[in-house]
Every structure is written in structure tokens, then in C-alpha cells.
Image: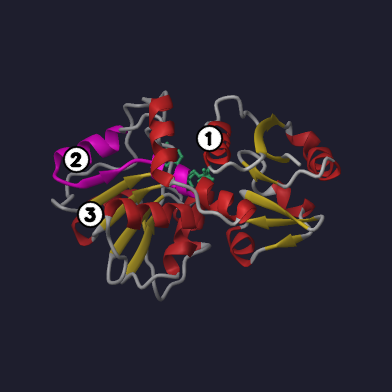
Amino acid sequence: MLKLFGLIGCPVHHSLSPLMHNDAFQSLHIDAHYHAFHVEPHMLKEAVEGLKALQCAGFNVTIPHKTAVMEYMDELDETAKQMGAVNTVVNENGKWVGYNTDGEGFVRALCEQMNIELSGARILIIGAGGAARGIYFTLLKHEAAAIDVCNRTMEKAEAFIQKERSAVYSLEQAEERLGAYDIIINTTSVGMYPHVDTMPISLQTLKTGTIVSDIIYNPLMTKFLQEAKEKGARVQNGVGMFVYQGALAFEKWTGIFPNTKRMEQLVIQQLG
Ligand code: ATR
């Protein structure tokens, strides 16, 4: 019997998830279909109940429902609880179980695509929103030497960091000490289309060879990544995180980890 998967969000018309998942189902000969559902915030409860009534096998959750959807879950995985957000839901024998693959997706993409290990690395996260928290808590599980956070609103970062492993800086302070980091990650929306001429921080003190990653994938090369590259950094855009969070969701639904290179090619083809 054909299995139904989906995405709920608002808006979702631009989402590349249906393309990526349906191609993976087809190439693996899995009888399933993934559909993007536009769900207004006031209809979230009805939508989640409706998907259960339809015996939907699982779904992704995107903006603005990642936190609100938690109260409609029958169970929550520890990572999702810690992040305070769910991006992947699995129908486990009629129970909705909420997971979050965003942080793990970012870290897997970083390590596999840039071919690096995190042990001993000094890492700076720019931003302290939902995406930053997901990435932060996943990085904590690795043996990084430091995972510092800088944010326009410093209190937001102070609210979730673990003081033994991390320090919090203002954006201006961070700009002065970029040379202290091996890996710098932008998790803010600064530089995203249509504001392509903006940067979260200036890169004057960046040292050659630093790894600079931006979770934005529209545009594929943000001004931040362009400047980092010009300064001799190794750069990575947000396509990797998008693909790996999807691949990890796919694995939770089917037990199979799909071909991420194929997914990435599809996504870049659409965006490029
Ligand atoms: P998400 O859940 O996608 O991470 P979010 O929770 O809205 O989104 O977080 C957005 C992040 O981008 C925050 O760190 C925010 O800084 P504040 O905490 O000070 O609001 C950051 N951000 C957004 N616009 C910014 C701007 N113009 N300059 C600096 N930081 C900005």
C-alpha cells in the first residue's frame, strides 16, 4: 500500500523537500509519496490530527510550526525536547513521535562534505535562534575544544549555553577575535534573499584556512561566504544541512539512509 509522507508549514510552496524525498522514494523503489501541505497556524491541531486519521506515515515540520507542533506529539525524543523544536514526525504504531534532525543534519554535512573531525576544534556560532540551538546541542556531543556563540542579543545566547564549554560574545567582540576559531557558522538569516548585500559580521580578522559555513542556501553563495572565500577560507553553504536533515528524516521513516549526493545535485539544479 502506498505510504503517505508530508511537510507542514506556512508557506511551503517554495519547498524543495517534495522533490528530494519523492526522487529518493522512486530511486529506492519505495511505494510512497511526499506532499507539501500549507497549514495556517490556527489549523495546526486539526492538520496534525487529520494526518493521523489519514494514516500518514510521517511528516516534516517547518516554519512557523516547529515549536507549536510539540504539544500534539504523543512522544518526544530527547534531542527534540532539548532543542524545543520538532522537524520530523514518525507514525510509530499510531503514535506521533517527534524528532529533530536539523542539528545532526548540519553536523553530518559539515564533517562529511568538508572532510573534517570536530575533536579539538574551536567553533564560533553566529546567532542564537532555533537553528543555532539545534546546532549547538549537537556540537556539544562532539569533542570540540570550544563552542562559542555570538549574537546581537547576547542574553538569548546566555540562556542556553553551557558555561564550561562556551563563551558568549557580542557581534562586535566576535569580529575582533575571528582568528581564534577553526570553524565559524552563520545561523542567522542575515544575507538571505532578498537582502543579499548584508553580512552578520565583518570578516576583517578571519585567518586563511578557517572553515566558514552558512546555513543559508538562497543565494547559494551569500556575501558572507564570498568574502570568506576571498580571504582564503574553506566555505560551505546551507544545501548540505538541508539535504542531511532530510536524509536523516528519510532514514527515520524508511530505515534507509538515502544517497545524499543525488539529493544535493537535485537541490542545486533547482536553486542554481
Ligand atoms: P531561527 O529559528 O531560524 O534560527 P530566529 O529564532 O528568528 O530564527 O533567530 C534568528 C537569529 O538571527 C537570531 O540570532 C537573531 O538575532 P537576535 O537574537 O538578536 O534577534 C539573528 N538576526 C536576525 N536578523 C538580524 C540582524 N539584522 N542582525 C543581526 N542578527 C540578526
Residue 136 in view here? yes
Do callouts 3 and 1 mark residues in contact (Cβ within 8 Å)?
no
Q: Secondary structure at mark 2?
A: helix
Q: Secondary structure at mark 3?
A: helix
Q: Amino acid at mark 3?
A: Leu
* Image position of 86 (left or right of 118): right
Q: Quadrant of residue 40?
A: top right
- In magenta stretch: residue 223: yes
Looking at the image, the residue that sits furthest to the right is 53
- Residue wearing tag 1: 23
Q: Which residues are drawn in magenta?
A: 222-244
Where residue 142 appears, as percent x and y from the top left, is 40, 70
Frontmost of labels 3 and 2 is: 2
Within 10 Å of the Cα at label 2, are there few (<14), some (14-19), or many (20+) other Cα atoms? some
Q: Which residue matches tag 2?
A: 229
Residue 147 coordinates in the image, percent (x, y): 36, 64
Amino acid type assigned to the residue bearing label 2 in the image: Lys
Q: Residue furthest front?
A: 29
Q: Residue furthest bottom?
A: 164
Instruction: Name the residue tied to disc 3.
Output: 178
Q: Quick check: 119 above or below 63? A: below
